[in-house]
Image (cartoon, rainbow, N blue to C red):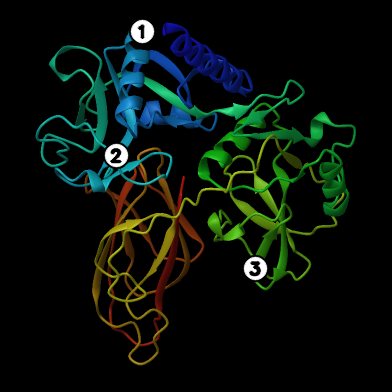
Amino acid sequence: MIFPKLMKFTIFALLFGIIHCSSVCPDGYAMVLDKCLMAIKNPMTHSQAETACTYTGGTLVNIKSAIENRAVSQFASNSGINQTWIGLFCFDNKNPSKCFYDDYSGTSALYDNFASGYPMVDGIYGGCVYTSTSGSLAGRWVSVKCEAESMPFICEMPISTYDASCPHNYNDFCYLKSSEMPIATGKFGDALKICEAQNGSLVSIHSKREIDYIKSLYRDQTSIRTILIGAQLVLPNLYSWTDGSNFESFDYRDPLSSASNNDNKCLFMDISSGLWSSGTCDYIGSSFLCKIPLSVVPTPQSEILSESNPSDFSKCNTTFLMAPGEFTSYGYLSTDPAEPPVYCTWKIVTTGAYKMRLFFTDVNTYNPIYVYAENGNEIERVRYSSSSVISRSNIVNVAFQASGRPGYTGFKAVVLAY
């Protein structure tokens, strides 16, 4: 009677081993359940830890079930870590539905393991979350001020499909740099043919994490400033990826980049900033990147999280505007009356893994636009178009008092994760 049970267990173990033998984690990472995890024992503040994880396209570990919570806690404990940051940031007291995962997958509304009374973000508390591996709070989550403490942490990267011939393996795709191939540069049509000959296409990009990963591939190649990516203009302001994936699920075009030249029908990624700008498809000196699926192509996950309460297109007096997005002064472009004399504030946020870039693409105001850090300190006063401001954390506040004077039409701004 014991034999059938033993047989079932053996078959399950063999299948489990086969599945994981076909999977791979980046160097330095260990496979835990369906995650790749790496323990960093050097204590860091939350922002330092986030930066360390995003350096190669990862985030702080995201925990979304009781099984994952136990596994992460055990992994941390086995690594000699008593407390670790996790990839969750909270914006409201005792409300897990306002705690957002760093990988843009949503909130902890469906599962959380906060200690009693948490999360607390006001006063002496804060929105950054950590978990303990021992003591009375073992496995429980606690929120604290992000920079008030330093502790070890765990980074997470996605598991990928194993391929011995792949030089850069990430999230079930193989990435091939043109500098590693016989033809190091080429115009769009030639680059596309080379990538298709490898059973792939010019790279399509679908998340901020993928942006971070691609940037890491070129970190040591200082001679390369931009790379050609797999997008082409099909209609005015409408691009399409050459691999057929959805362009609208993620758009990281530089809002300050001019697209007035009708010959600029291709997109190039700046490997320093990650932003995309338009350029000619016929430039023969373009470095490029191929992207080859290693398994069934997954549906790219959108990074657009909408949590705003707009009163009109301006989103005036929004208390929770999740990046990416855009906002304007009240009555933007109005000529009758010009620049309505309305006072507006905006609280703009992104996940805890990132800061933000605010691009002021059109400014025609009498009064300046004030940009404040999370703690209320002024970062900058914006007076001109084509200005950009980088936040100091994942929360930024903007305030503007319109003058009501004739001849002024207001402002428009775009915000992206940084």
Q: Position of residue 106 (x, y in %)?
A: 36, 47
10 Å neighbourhood of mark 1: few (<14), some, or many (≥20)? few
Q: Position of residue 69 (x, y in %)?
A: 31, 25
Q: Are marks 1 and 2 in contact (CB under 8 Å)?
A: no
Q: Is residue 163 left or right of residue 300?
A: right
Q: Is residue 20 left or right of residue 285?
A: left
Give the secondary structure at mark 3: strand
Q: Position of residue 328 (x, y in %)?
A: 38, 71
Residue with the mark numbered 2:
89
Q: Which mark is residue 169?
A: none
Q: Which one is in front in this view, the residue at disc 1 or the one at disc 3?
A: 1
The quadrant where residue 19 appears: top right
Please state, as top left, top right, bottom left or bottom right, where the N terminus lies in the image.
Answer: top left
Give the secondary structure at mark 2: strand
Q: Which one is in front in this view, the residue at disc 1 or the one at disc 2?
A: 1
Q: Which mark is residue 78?
A: 1
The reply to whether residue 374 is in sight is no
Q: Earlier in the sequence, mark 3 or mark 2?
A: 2
| Towards the viewer: 92 or 138 | 138
Q: Which mark is residue 238?
A: 3
Q: Is residue 176 left or right of residue 66?
A: right
Compared with 54, 250 (above or below) is: below
Q: Is residue 11 left or right of residue 410?
A: right
The reply to whether residue 60 is in sight is yes
| Towards the viewer: 213 or 18 | 18
Q: Amino acid at mark 1?
A: Asn
Q: Residue at x 14, y 38 (%)?
A: 120
Compared with 408, 113 (above or below) is: above
